[in-house]
Amino acid sequence: MPKLRRLEWGAYLEVEGIPSTEIEFLRMLAGPSLIALPGSDASRVRVVTTLLHGNEPSGLRAMHRWLRTDPRPATRVLLFVASVETALRDPIFSHRHLPGRRDFNRCFGPPASDAEGLLAQEVLAAILASRPECLVDLHNNTGHNPAYGVAVRLDDPELGLVRFFTDRVVHAPLALGTLVEATIDACPSVTIECGRSGDPVADEVARIGLEALLARDELDLRGPGRPMRILDEPIRVCVTDPTTIDFGVGAGPDVSLTISADIDRHNFERLPAGSTIGWMRAGSDWPLDARGTDGRECSREIFRVRDGILETRCDFIPIMMTTKPEIAKSDCLFYAAREGQRR
Ligand SMILES: [Zn+2]
């Protein structure tokens, strides 16, 4: 992984030097880049990060477009564009991380000495040294999803940050080693999942939110704003043996579990008890592992198998459901959440 580049707006970077397409812009950056811009109030800094996953371009597109407007932000701004090399690897915007390398947004936990861990430490140190007043990390996901925020800690400041982008937020106090987890003690810090990668609607969510966030002088993160739909206590649902699953419309002959191919249509909808998740091959082992923030395995409280059909045992709201086998294998199948209070 290449070394972090630091670019100062006006010195190493200016509007005339920003290419007209985001792909040319990435080629110009060439590697992980921290771009600093001056703002009207030089005493405050806002941080926006993106492309921690190379296949999630909405945040990059928003930054690229914003930079080309020769912006005058309300405060100083730090933009971090992370996995440039990964994003540029053919086919472009298709790799979450490079083969054989770690997921970069799992590298912000305890220090590690591999290339990803060292880069994460360097970026984190630079961000914390700037004493930011907020951090927003822009992502996409692979399933059919509306835009939503993800907050490790969810108080009024985090709700206020998410409101710039969407009115849905998942309160997920999970410890995965993400950038947001590593910064929540320094400032309000949230992830925005803008929607599906490649969907122009997701790009618009990122663009509108980013422009508003960086233009506004006062963030007004203390008081109530538009009501937010809060999803609480997500339970992470994984497959126990990722080598034996597939997606389809009935039990496949070569796999233990075939997951319903249109399962992601139910993201953010209430999924009633008895809903089909997939089909089991006869004699297969229990396929799921589900854990909430307490770490307790609870998959049999949420799912059951009846006549070879894997179905839900109770009502819940699925989020981040994917139909990409590689995501289900390397990350998780989805999260099961409950509707919290509106705030
Ligand atoms: Zn992501």
Image: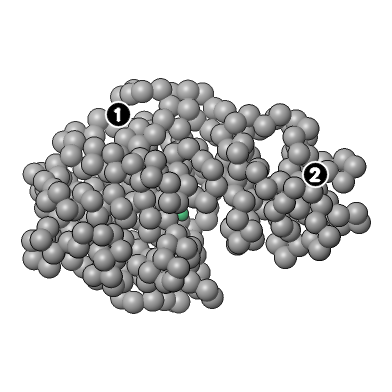
Q: Which mark is residue 29?
A: none
Question: In which quadrant is the C terminus drawn?
Answer: top left
User: How far is disc 1 from disc 2 in space, using C-alphas?
Assistant: 44 Å
Disc 2 packing (10 Å; few <14; some 14–19; many ≥20): many
Picture residue at 45% right of the left edge, 68% below the top? 91
Residue 49 in view (yes/no): no
- Counting from the top left corner in percent of width and height, residue 4 is at 29, 71
Marking on residue 310: 2
Q: Are marks 1 and 2 in contact (CB under 8 Å)?
A: no
Q: Where is residue 294 drawn, in percent x and y?
A: 63, 45
Q: Percent x, y for residue 324?
A: 60, 55
Residue at image location 73% in from the left, 43% down from the top: 277
Label 1 beta carbon within 8 A of ligand 1: no
Quarter of the picture containing the N terminus is bottom left
- Amino acid under label 1? Arg
Q: Residue at x 26, y 66 (%)?
A: 24
Amino acid type for the residue under numbered disc 2? Leu
Few, some or many residues within 10 Å of mark 1 (<14, 14–19, 20+): few
The vertical placement of 287 against 318, above or below, is below
Residue under pointer 1: 222
Camera sees residue 240: yes
Q: Work out whether 54 lies above or below 172.
A: below
Disc nearer the start of the sequence (1/2): 1
